[in-house]
Structure formats: structure tokens, C-alpha cells
Image (cartoon, helix red, strand yellow):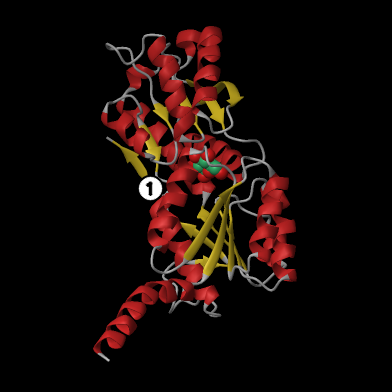
């Protein structure tokens, strides 16, 4: 009798955690790439914050929208309760939204913002990200503050700041709007500027370095400011600037990025990166996890049960500037 009781206890102890795990909502997570510094950090935070609350199944699309579409179809076939997707191409999110609707599944898009009319078409589709206009403005304000404090960095003394812009992926809302609004804010702050050139470096550090090296060849010391749509490209630019002799002695130049990734924070501490704008991965992860838990339980988010501001099923996590 005692033996049978022990066996039963053992069985329960073994099955307990399995049963608890099986009860967690199944969430399929599709990220556009596994090689993007910011996305890697964001997905890591989602994994951490989802622990014990969501049963996450994470896949990466390697920058291929067709591959991602197949991955999402597979998630649906596997019986997930919620879809969470960082689309490869924000315009193609319309297909993912239609697919989710067709299967009656809630869909949380993140980081790559769908067109508003596409999101509006399905009342269980949501977007979690940041406001790229505000991030651009904060970049512009950082630049203006820098030159107010360092007028001597207007190297040719013409009262106009000559700058170069490193852009992220074309068509990505963060690349387009950060570019536009950083310039607007510099002007609004009374900083006179002249864009010497802009180069697309697709969010990548290696390309940022290449493009910056090329720009230095063409413009040399005429460049007085570098604005990059993200930190990885800013850090690539810093590598090129270092190779050209900057940051060793007195020769310096302000470089401004976005994200506040770990390597960027290090570069700020070392005095190479002047500033960045936080792209708060922790809060974005928290928002998608909270939202997935609610949706999986069949609840709609409200001001009472969801602690993030939401308008038209869009959640923007606030951003703040970071310097030394
Ligand atoms: C980030 C970039 C990242 C991109 C990926 C942006 O919000 O600032 O670092 O490469 O998202 O979609």
C-alpha cells in the first residue's frame, strides 16, 4: 500500500510541471532576422518575460517574406493560440493579418509597423513598437544641444553644420521617419544644417563602416556630424572614423544613433558615440507578452487590464535620449 502511494506521488511530481507547461498559451513568434542586434535583444527580452506565462515557439525568417509566410502557416497548423510576428516587409503584413483573421487567431505585430488601413481591417490585430517621429526629433535635439555646447565643432566656422546620414532599410517606417524628423528638429532648434550625403546601410554595422569610409574619402573633414538611423550603423561609422584617426587624440566628431543597445552604451561610456535614443526593448517585450497573455485568455486589452497606452490597437513605448 505504502509502495503504491509512493509511486503515485512520484508520478504526480513528474507530471505536475508537464501539465502546468501544457496549460500555458502556445504562442508562435516569427522574427524577420536572427542577425539583427536590436531584434536579437528584443526577442531575448520576450523570451525572458514570457517565461512561466507563455509557451513560446520562436522562428527566424532570414529576411525572406515568403519563408516567413510559410513559418506562420506552420504555426497555425501546429495549433498556436496567438501569433506574434515581426514582419520582414511591413507592407506584406496585410497577408499575415488576413491569414490570422481567416483562422480567428489574435495577431500581435511588432517592430515593423503595418499600414494603418491594414491593421484596421481585423479587430484582433495589434501593433507594438515605438514612435519613430519622436525618436528622430530626439536625435535632432541631441545634435542641436551638442553644437550649442561645442561651437568649435563647426570645423569650417561657416555657421552651418555639414552632416552625413546613414539610413536603415528603405521602406522601413523607422528609417524614413527618423531621417525626416531628426532634420526637422535640428532646424526647429535653430541649428543650420547642410546634408552632404546620405547612404543606405540597411541597419548593418559592416555596411555602416563601409559607407562611412567611402564618405570620408569623398568629404574628409568637411563632415561635422554623423546621424545614423540605428546604433549598429553608428558603431560601424565609428569604426571607419577611428581608422581615419578620429577619437584617438583631440580629433572628434559627434555620432548619434538610435536603440541604446549594449555595445552602443559601451561606446557612449568610452566617449566615441556621442548619443543615442533608447528603443526600449524591455518595455516593448513586456507589452507584447502582456498582450499575448490577455488575448490568449480571450480578453481584449483595456485601460484597466493593460498597463500601456494604446490607440487604435497600436502601442507606442516612449523613448528617451541617452548621452554620457
Ligand atoms: C531598430 C533597428 C533594427 C530594426 C529592425 C529598428 O527599430 O532601430 O536597429 O535593425 O528596427 O526592424
In the rendered image, the vertical position of residue 311 relative to residue 252, given as above or below: below
Badge 1 element: loop
Identify the residue position indicated by label 1 in the image: 320
Residue 70 drawn at (x, y percent): 71, 53
- Residue behind label 1 places its C-beta within 8 angstroms of ligand 1: no
In the rendered image, the vertical position of residue 173 relative to residue 194, given as above or below: below
Count up the numbered dots. 1
Query: Which one is in front, 53 or 98?
Result: 53
Query: Which one is in front, 229 or 97?
Result: 97
Residue drawn at 42 percent across, 15 percent down: 241
Left of 3 or right of it: where is 255?
A: right
Going by the picture, which residue comes out furthest to the bottom? 1
Residue 167 drawn at (x, y percent): 57, 31
Going by the picture, which residue comes out furthest to the left? 2
- Asked whether residue 164 is in view, the answer is no
Query: Which one is in front, 284 or 219?
Result: 284
Residue 139 drawn at (x, y percent): 44, 38
In the rendered image, the vertical position of residue 94 relative to residue 234, given as above or below: below
Residue drawn at 58 percent across, 52 percent down: 86
- Asked whether residue 211 is in view, the answer is yes
Which quarter of the rendering shows the N terminus?
Answer: bottom left
Which quarter of the rendering shows the C terminus?
Answer: top left
Residue drawn at 62 percent across, 70 percent down: 106
- Binning the other alpha carbons within 10 Å of mark 1 as few (below 14), some (14 to 19) or many (20 upward) gives some
Residue 3 drawn at (x, y percent): 27, 85
Query: Which one is in front, 33 or 190?
Result: 33
Amino acid at each position: 500500500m505504502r509502495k503504491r502511494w509512493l509511486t503515485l506521488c512520484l508520478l504526480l511530481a513528474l507530471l505536475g510541471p508537464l501539465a502546468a507547461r501544457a496549460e500555458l498559451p502556445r504562442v508562435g513568434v516569427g522574427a524577420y532576422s536572427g542577425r539583427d542586434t536590436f531584434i536579437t535583444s528584443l526577442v531575448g527580452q520576450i523570451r525572458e518575460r514570457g517565461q512561466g506565462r507563455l509557451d513560446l515557439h520562436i522562428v527566424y525568417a532570414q529576411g525572406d517574406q515568403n519563408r516567413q509566410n510559410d513559418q506562420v502557416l506552420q504555426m497555425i497548423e501546429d495549433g498556436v493560440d496567438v501569433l506574434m510576428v515581426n514582419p520582414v516587409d511591413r507592407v506584406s503584413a496585410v497577408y499575415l493579418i488576413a491569414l490570422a483573421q481567416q483562422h480567428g487567431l489574435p495577431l500581435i505585430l511588432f517592430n515593423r509597423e503595418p499600414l494603418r488601413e491594414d491593421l484596421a481591417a481585423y479587430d484582433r490585430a495589434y501593433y507594438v513598437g515605438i514612435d519613430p517621429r519622436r525618436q528622430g526629433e530626439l536625435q535632432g535635439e541631441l545634435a542641436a544641444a551638442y553644437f550649442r555646447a561645442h561651437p568649435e565643432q563647426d570645423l569650417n566656422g561657416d555657421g552651418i553644420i555639414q552632416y552625413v546620414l546613414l539610413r536603415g532599410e528603405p521602406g522601413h517606417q523607422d528609417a524614413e521617419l527618423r531621417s525626416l524628423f531628426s532634420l526637422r528638429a535640428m532646424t526647429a532648434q535653430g541649428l543650420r544644417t547642410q546634408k552632404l550625403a546620405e547612404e543606405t546601410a540597411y541597419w548593418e554595422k559592416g555596411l555602416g563602416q563601409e559607407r562611412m569610409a567611402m564618405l570620408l574619402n569623398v568629404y574628409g573633414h568637411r563632415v561635422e556630424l554623423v546621424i545614423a538611423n540605428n546604433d549598429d550603423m553608428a558603431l560601424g561609422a565609428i569604426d571607419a572614423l577611428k581608422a581615419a584617426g578620429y577619437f584617438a587624440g583631440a580629433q572628434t566628431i559627434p555620432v548619434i544613433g538610435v536603440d541604446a543597445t549594449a555595445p552602443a552604451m559601451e561606446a557612449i561610456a568610452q566617449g566615441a558615440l556621442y548619443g543615442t535614443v533608447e528603443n526600449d526593448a524591455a518595455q516593448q517585450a513586456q507589452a507584447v507578452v502582456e498582450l499575448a497573455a490577455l488575448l490568449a485568455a480571450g480578453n481584449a486589452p483595456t485601460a484597466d487590464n493593460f498597463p500601456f497606452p494604446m490607440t487604435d490597437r497600436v502601442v507606442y513605448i516612449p523613448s528617451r535620449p541617452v548621452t554620457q
